[in-house]
Image (cartoon, rainbow, N blue to C red):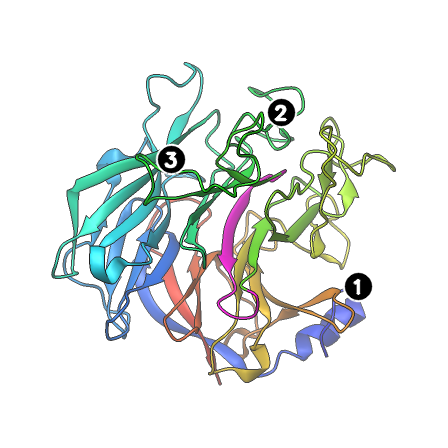
Amino acid sequence: MFCGVVTLAMAAQCAASDQTFGLKPFSEGFVSPTSMVPLPDSDGSLLVADQVGVVYLLNKDGQRAEKAFLDVRPRLTKINEGFDERGLLGIALHPKFAENRKFYAVYSGLKRPTAPEDWDHTMRVAEFTANSDGLTARDESHRIVLEVDKPYFNHNGGCIQFGPDGLLYMSVGDGGNGMDQGKRPPEGNGQNLQTLLGKILRIDVDGKKPYGIPRDNPFVGKSARPEIYAYGMRNPWRMSFDSGGSHQLFAGDVGQDSFEEVDIIVKGGNYGWNVREGLHCFNPKDSIHAPEDCPKKAANGDPFIDPIFEYKNLKAHPNDAEAQGCSITGGYVYRGKAIPWLQGKYVFADWSHTMVKPDGRLFAASPGPDGKWTWQRIIPGSHKEGMKFYITGFGRDSEGELYIFTNDSNGLVGATGKVQKIVPL
């Protein structure tokens, strides 16, 4: 059975159809892992980024190297010990990493002098080069590639991925605060093509320095920022390319109060924020009571693209069985071999059923013969009594197997962060 949850009875039925899989502890001692990449031509080694600013090298058994691979803590803006969305947000290896040893990191840096005085920080994409031994990075190789000034501490996005075209894609949130309000133009950042906020960007790191603009980017030559690949996003925290199929780009976009959504990102696409939240109209002045009708096109005539599916957020639907969480954590399409029943399904999560109590939830989604996507909650056999942790992200190794990143706190404190592998039972 594969379903979207629509009633309490069906929710129980869907949860019971979880097939056999579990979560196996792989590596621990992090604060809050955010990103993982496999090292090419290695014996299964991985790089894992921790939000507080450190990248660790792990061997195939999850054991850390003695020395940190990279430490960007001196470059970060001051991070809260409580809840914070800033920090080291993403890492990606250059497609020719085995030859040039280059890799990229996104972090929340000190506000640059040209940023508005009352803004919060500057998000940076930086290039580094690993040492020839592959065990550490050269800090002095740091080169700033792209900078995005942020008015508030939240809604950063900060996921970076190299696409099948060899270009670097980056998710950027709408600037923060709430309702797409405050320190922004009247239409909000998501719909404004003069800002990089609320967008999916695409740049060429091998082009003219600090970066090149791909000639076929959709807004090249128009009255818009040419880095923009897609727009109308709120907080696309995690995104990923399918390593199989047609290599589609999936993004989990965190909603305001009512709906969480998953989008397939296409060139030039407008995903509706802040006119729409999920499949519904949105009122920037009242997040709970949406208008019955709203435009189907942007002011420039671009049609709004619907998500492939959505689910309700508990904040606006506290007593609704369809409400599955409070903040979507985008994942990956599974292309591994260990769990055949997951093959081709998009595996994703919600950070927690409620914000104040660790209760992360896993899901899997798949398109039907008619092309419509359905989803279900999946429960690991190793955690049938519930997953009493927050789920902050996903990783994928060189074999296509998936990992989830977890921690026990909704703040950046302690060392409860773990990498856990999704395994057959």
In primary-sequence order, the first of circles 2 and 3 is 3
Q: Amino acid at mark 2?
A: Gln
Seen at 63% across and 52% down, the residue is 263
Residue 31 shows in the view:
no
Q: Residue 281's image quarter? A: top right
The residues colored magenta run: 232-246
Q: Amino acid at mark 1?
A: Val
Name the foreground residue: 353 vs 178: 178
**Circle 1 sits in a helix, a strand or a loop, which is it?**
loop
Callout 3 touching callout 1 (CB < 8 Å): no
**Circle 2 sits in a helix, a strand or a loop, which is it?**
loop
Q: Position of residue 289 (x, y in %)?
A: 81, 35
Q: Position of residue 211 (x, y in %)?
A: 35, 37
Q: Main secondary structure of the magenta part?
A: loop
Q: In screen coordinates, is 161 left or right of 271?
A: left
Report the residue marked by disc 2.
Answer: 181
> Residue 6 shows which numbered tag?
1
How many residues crowd mark 3 within 10 Å: few (<14), some (14–19), many (20+)? some
